[in-house]
Image (tube, rainbow, N blue to C red):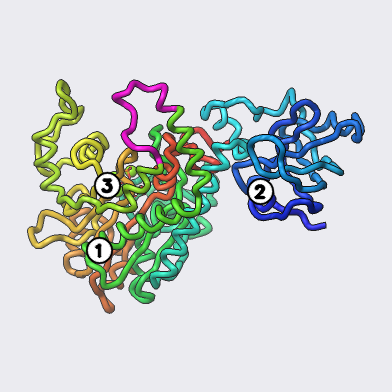
């Protein structure tokens, strides 16, 4: 007999038929009611057991967490809650779960506790909802690019280049770290390594994406990236997924238009396709908010917030305009910013970004035309010689969600910048080739997938929107 998912049984299966379903026990009440869940939906199917017809030893194995196959008749439910339930005829126990030892009991667990149980937390309502929304967002991302003429291209994970020059890389080597071969200067001799040079886990697929855009036109990568961020924030992971579109013949304005349209489109997708999970997450957030003082509570519910972002224009502001606003602002009556903005040229801290988004504009903001000296070397220099065609998209409650730019397409200007930074041209010979042979205006951006999932689910910590978070001292799972 073919098994059905719980979702099919609850939504589409006709009643008075024999059905079979597999899943995990959420609760087993009064030796009679099994609430079974299989991850296909937030809801459980109730399975009604006439315990006199079942062996005592079998019933004993049915506890929260056990995996079962249940066969029976789908009937209209007498009680409240779901419309249908199963009158059970047969139960097969795939695997029991000792109630003394199984950590995921029906009571509410803290998110911190569940982080220690990353391998089991997806069996809770919160995490299954988050991970289904995550999956839907990933699908929506591919769908958007596919429908808009982009090719999905795969950047290498192991690279010899450091795109950002930020020095936050995980080194990859086959050399014996205790006793590495040394060259004549006493330095580690990477020529002896498997790759014959020093290699790292990628921090971004951008440089390679540029190469592919300059041949396929519009491309995107969507893969894991790695940063040895030794900071414990709720917005940074050492391993995170990044979406990086790159487009030939796009200037910064076209890049900003695309980024805004793309984000709105994927949010629309989950508003239409993840209603049940979003409603659950919204309720969860409302319960959490009740514990806060009125002034700190959000003015909008989760779904209202998503709708607002999906249906309203993002505010576009130059860095120079933003600085003027920040100079004349106080985050609240008494306090200045922890790092007051006094000079043009200073890098914005997250307190400034969040002030602009949450207090001043009260909507997503695209900041652009940053000072050249605080941005990466590959960004296109403006005619003023001081600013570059960079943009960051800032989101309420999140801060930076996107970093992007128009790339420097002029060989001579790029060379000057590389020289000024003391980067060896030989390291970037292939990147310079792209400017020697058929160069053109091009642009792209990087969107941190987990930051998008954070926003979409209303979760507060990036560790709770990725299955197995990688943070300092944390790679147990
Ligand atoms: P931040 O200022 O938040 O540290 P960044 O400017 O260093 O971010 P970029 O190099 O611009 O990050 O990367 C592009 C996007 O990747 C960011 O806008 C953000 O959404 C995401 N991102 C960057 N670092 C991380 C990280 N450690 N964990 C999760 N997402 C990240
Ligand atoms: Mg950073
Ligand atoms: Mg940044
Ligand atoms: Mg950035």
Q: Is residue 166 left or right of residue 272?
A: left
Quarter of the image with the N terminus is: bottom right
Residue placed farthest to the bottom in the image? Answer: 438
Q: Position of residue 359 (x, y in %)?
A: 21, 35
Q: From this viewpoint, is residue 201 visible?
A: no
44 or 136: nearer the eye? 44
Label 3, ligand 1: CB separation under 8 Å: no
Reading the image, the residue beneath label 3 is: 364
Pick the residue in front: 313 or 413: 313
Q: Quadrant of residue 468?
A: top right
150 to 399, vertically: above or below: below
Mark 2 vs mark 3, CA separation in Å: 38 Å
Q: Which mark is residue 197?
A: none
Magenta span of residues = 288-302
| Proximity of marks 2 and 1: CB atoms separated by less than 8 Å | no
Disc sitting over residue 407 in the figure: 1
Q: In the structure shown, which secondary structural element does the residue marked by tag 1 occupy?
A: loop
Q: Residue at x 46, y 28 (%)?
A: 287
Q: Does the magenta stretch include residue 296?
A: yes
């Amino acid at each position: 007999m073919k098994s059905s998912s719980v979702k099919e049984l609850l939504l589409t299966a006709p009643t008075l038929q024999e059905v079979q379903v597999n899943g995990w026990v959420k609760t087993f009440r009064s030796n009679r009611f099994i609430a079974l869940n299989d991850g296909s939906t937030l809801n459980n199917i109730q399975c009604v057991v006439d315990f006199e017809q079942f062996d005592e030893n079998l019933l004993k194995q049915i506890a929260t967490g056990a995996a079962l196959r249940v066969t029976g008749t789908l009937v209209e439910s007498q009680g409240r809650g779901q419309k249908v339930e199963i009158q059970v005829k047969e139960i097969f126990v795939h695997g029991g779960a000792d109630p003394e030892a199984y950590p995921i009991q029906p009571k509410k667990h803290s998110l911190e506790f569940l982080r220690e149980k990353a391998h089991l937390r997806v069996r809770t309502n919160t995490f299954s909802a988050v991970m289904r929304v995550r999956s839907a967002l990933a699908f929506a991302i591919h769908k958007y690019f596919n429908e808009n003429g982009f090719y999905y291209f795969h950047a290498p994970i192991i690279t010899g280049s450091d795109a950002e020059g930020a020095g936050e890389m995980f080194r990859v080597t086959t050399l014996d770290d205790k006793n590495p071969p040394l060259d004549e200067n006493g330095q580690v001799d990477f020529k002896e390594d498997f790759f014959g040079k020093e290699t790292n886990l990628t921090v971004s697929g951008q440089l390679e994406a540029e190469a592919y855009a300059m041949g396929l036109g519009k491309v995107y990568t969507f893969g894991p990236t790695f940063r040895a961020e030794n900071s414990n924030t709720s917005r940074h992971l050492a391993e995170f997924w990044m979406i990086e579109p790159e487009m030939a013949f796009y200037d910064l304005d076209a890049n900003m238009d695309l980024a805004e349209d793309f984000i709105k489109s994927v949010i629309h997708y989950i508003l239409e396709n993840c209603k049940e999970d979003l409603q659950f997450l919204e309720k969860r957030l409302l319960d959490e908010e009740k514990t806060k003082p009125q002034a700190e509570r959000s003015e909008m519910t989760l779904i209202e917030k998503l709708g607002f972002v999906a249906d309203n224009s993002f505010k576009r502001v130059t860095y120079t305009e933003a600085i003027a606003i920040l100079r004349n602002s106080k985050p609240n009556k008494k306090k200045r910013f922890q790092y007051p903005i006094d000079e043009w040229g200073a890098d914005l801290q997250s307190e400034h970004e969040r002030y602009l988004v949450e207090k001043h504009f009260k909507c997503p903001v695209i900041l652009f035309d940053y000072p050249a000296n605080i941005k990466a070397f590959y960004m296109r220099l403006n005619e003023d010689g001081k600013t570059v065609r960079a943009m960051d998209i800032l989101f309420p409650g999140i801060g930076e969600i996107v970093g992007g730019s128009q790339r420097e397409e002029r060989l001579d200007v790029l060379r000057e910048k590389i020289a000024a930074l003391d980067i060896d041209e030989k390291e970037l010979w292939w990147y310079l080739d792209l400017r020697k042979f058929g160069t053109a205006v091009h642009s792209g951006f990087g969107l941190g997938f987990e930051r998008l999932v954070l926003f979409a689910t209303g979760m507060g910590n990036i560790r709770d929107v990725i299955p197995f978070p990688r943070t300092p001292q944390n790679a147990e799972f």
